[in-house]
Image (cartoon, rainbow, N blue to C red):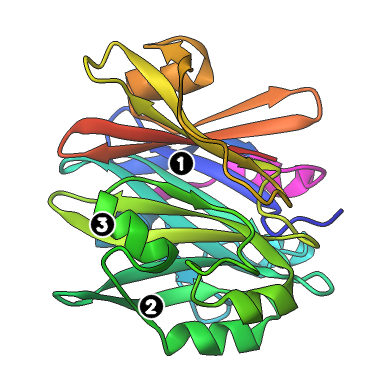
Amino acid sequence: MSTFIRVTEIWTPDRDGRCLTLRDGIYGELDHFRDHSAKVTFAHGEGLPGTAWKTRAPVILKTFEGSVFKRTAEAHEAGLTAAIGLPVFCGEFLNAVIVFLCGQVEKLAGAIEVWEQKRSTELGLRDGFYGEWEKFESLSKSLVFQRGRGLPGLSWETGLPEIMGNLETSNSFLRAKVAAEAGIRTGIAIPFYSTGPLDAIVTFLSSTSTPIARRFEIWKPNEDRSRLRFEGGIEENSDSVEVSDAGRWVEFGKGPIGMTWATGVPRVEYHGDTQLLTIPIIEAGSLNSVVALYS
């Protein structure tokens, strides 16, 4: 099965903090692109990782020609045509930039979106990548979300990651009809924090034909911040979201999820045929939650 995201990279500051180097990644069979990327560095403001660092915001590139992207020839050789840079900050300090690279395959369906506050009571679309589903993109551009409404609005209200399933029939998902046409069934909204209040909401919408992940999970510190508790999860193509379970937890510094809490840095782990990406959500210098994507 083709996937919406074909490559995931984690770029982190070098010892001097002057440029970004490749820490880890998920490349599948694209060894040549991995080898090239391992030799590249990005200064502040350079390339997609450096631009996400400088602008302190998620950056979406729907095409590489004429953009800040620096590995265009190698990316095209690997069949990669679009990319998203998601920086992870702890206050004013950059911990990492996660880069997701997508390729144009037949009937590429799904979405990665960035929603930002347009008015005091509304979120509007800043940018998004939708594969071949122009109808879904067009509808999304015309929408605004109030606090607590829809998937982006729900994350805006709680300030936490939020998961939705069965999107094609959900009364809470405002684009359900068009989502059904695209086969989009599951989604997760991730709050983005830079140096201050909530800056944006990043949504990942996954389809049955080209899923973004096999599974999404959210882990949140418990009341005394002694461990991370399982807050919710969903399998691809599932109709229901698994609810919070205090009986499922990980300790600080234990395993990939616990290590993400300890370091504030995204991680990639391999478990047989399954790859795990962990994303720390850091708010005002403290861990808000950890999002886990299994692919």
- The residue under label 3 is 157
**The disc labelled 1 sits on which kind of residue?**
Trp
Q: Secondary structure at mark 1?
A: strand
Q: Which residue range is magenta in the image?
A: 26-47
Please tell me whether residue 242 is drawn above or below residue 224 in the rendered image.
below
Task: For marks 2 and 3, give the CA distance.
Answer: 17 Å
Judged left or right of residue 63, residue 67 is left
Q: Is residue 110 left or right of residue 14?
A: right
**What label does residue 187 carry, if any?**
none
Q: Which mark is residue 125?
A: 2
CB under 8 Å between discs 2 and 3: no
What SS does tag 3 mark?
Answer: helix
Q: Residue at horizontal 45%, vertical 70%? A: 68
Q: Which of the two labelled residues, at mark 3 and mark 1, occupies the earlier sequence position?
A: 1
Q: Residues within 10 Å of mark 1 (few under 14, many from 20)?
A: many
Is residue 211 visible to the viewer in this orientation of the structure? yes
Q: Nearer the viewer, mark 3 or mark 1?
A: 3
* Mark sitting earlier along the chain (2/3): 2
Between the residue at mark 3 and the residue at mark 1, the CA separation in whole angstroms equals 30 Å
Q: Percent from the top left, x then y, of residue 209? A: 81, 62
Answer above or below: position of 269 versus 81. above
Give me the residue at 30% from left, 20% from top.
Answer: 222
Q: Earlier in the sequence, mark 1 or mark 2?
A: 1
Horizontal arrangement in the rendering, residue 141 relative to residue 205 (left or right): left
> Which residue sits at x=37%, y=55%?
50
Check residue 11 in the rendering and tell me which mark sits there, or answer none: 1
Tell me if residue 42 comes above or below residue 90 in the rendering.
below
- Residue 15 at what x, y percent from top left? 32, 27
Badge 3: residue crowd in 10 Å (few <14, some 14–19, many ≥20): few
Task: Tell me what residue is drawn at x 45 percent, y 57 percent.
Answer: 85
Tell me the distance, in whole angstroms, between the alpha carbons under discs 1 and 2.
26 Å
Question: Given the image, on which type of amino acid does mark 2 rest?
Answer: Leu
